Amino acid sequence: MVGAFGLGLAALGRPGYMTLGHDGDVPDASVAGLRDRCFEVLDEAWQLGVRHVDTARSYGLGEAFLAEWIASRTPVRLVVSSKWGYRYTAGWQRRAEVHEVKDHSRAHLDVQWRQSRALLGHALSVYQVHSLTPDSPLLSDADVQHRLAELRDGAGVSLGASVSGPRQGELVDRLVALERNGRRLFDWVQATWNVLERSAGPALTRAHEAGLRVIIKEALANGRLSPRGDVEAVKQAAQAHGTTADALALAIARAQPFADVVLCGAASVTQLRSNLAGSGLNVAPDSLSFVTQPPEAYWNFRTQLKWT
């Protein structure tokens, strides 16, 4: 059993993102230009069989673009996940001093829930906390957890959480153990996993075995595992497979036994087609394990990536 591919809108809902060469991928970064590009990629993703789209309040106009696309296309059985916890602050600039501000408070949850629900309505089926780290107050905030449980029980959404940083595995285990109103709080977990950063794998396996659905993000390591990336061993292995680095890296992520959804972060139709070209590749889950890095080294490098 392999996971399905989904589409993440981080690179399509705002002008700037920390993917290598993103500014060249989206030459028209006006609101109208990005809206048109987002529609093009969503249309192609749907045609290629993608049935899960992931967005967030901090993805600029990502939710608004997606809501408009859904209203105009009325797709059937589309799974929409969004995230709360970050506020977009870049003012529609590629390069800003601060692109997003983190806030996991109850007040921010209430504001962003209303915003997401107003845009996406009942198309929003998975509601996630955005980028939990070990210092996130939500992990011990009974008020926020209670409010999330109210949304789960009363608004008809499943709850999830995305995690980030070198201690992802620890966070996933804590999320699995959280309970509210006599049942587990979260049904989904989203984590970074790629051939460079595999440290969350054992915890994601435990979460999957416990019944949570797992979304893999950053499977291309912010473009490092694409043809323009810096990992030559992946490019060479892809050539040996008769494919591209991005297609191979995504195929390996999809082959993980815990993976339910593997997100592509394509910013163009060309990128999306390249990403999904490896959907038929037969690869082992431990392929390219020799390129794996210590998590601290991987995340230290990631913090130095520039928004473009």
Image (cartoon, helix red, strand yellow):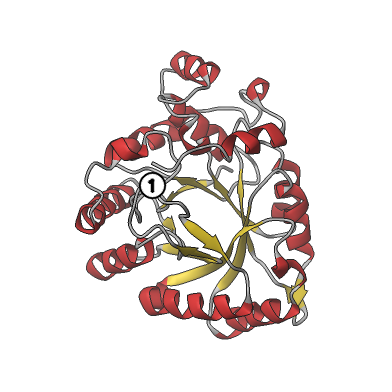
Relative to 43, is 132 on the left or the right? right
In this rendering, the answer to whether 119 lies above or below 80 is below
Q: Secondary structure at mark 1?
A: loop
Q: Quadrant of the N terminus?
A: top right
- Residue 295, located in which quarter of the rendered image? top right
**Which residue is rendered at x = 49% and y = 29% of the image?**
225
Residue positioned 30% across, 63% down in the render: 65
Reply above or below: 139 against 230. below
Residue 219 relative to residue 174: left or right: left
Camera-nearest residue between 292 and 272: 292
Residue 169 locus on image (x, y percent) = 74, 48
Which image quadrant for residue 298?
top right
Q: Which residue is mark 1?
A: 95
Location of the C terminus (image quadrant): top left
Q: Amino acid at mark 1?
A: Arg
Tell me which residue sits at (70%, 72%) in the image: 185
Which x, y percent locates residue 123? Answer: 41, 72
Q: Is residue 230 above or below residue 126?
A: above
**Residue pictured at 42% horizontal, 46% vertical:** 17
User: Would you identify the image quadrant in which residue 66 lies?
Assistant: bottom left
Give the image location of residue 201, x and y in percent.
70, 42
- Residue lying farthest front? 97
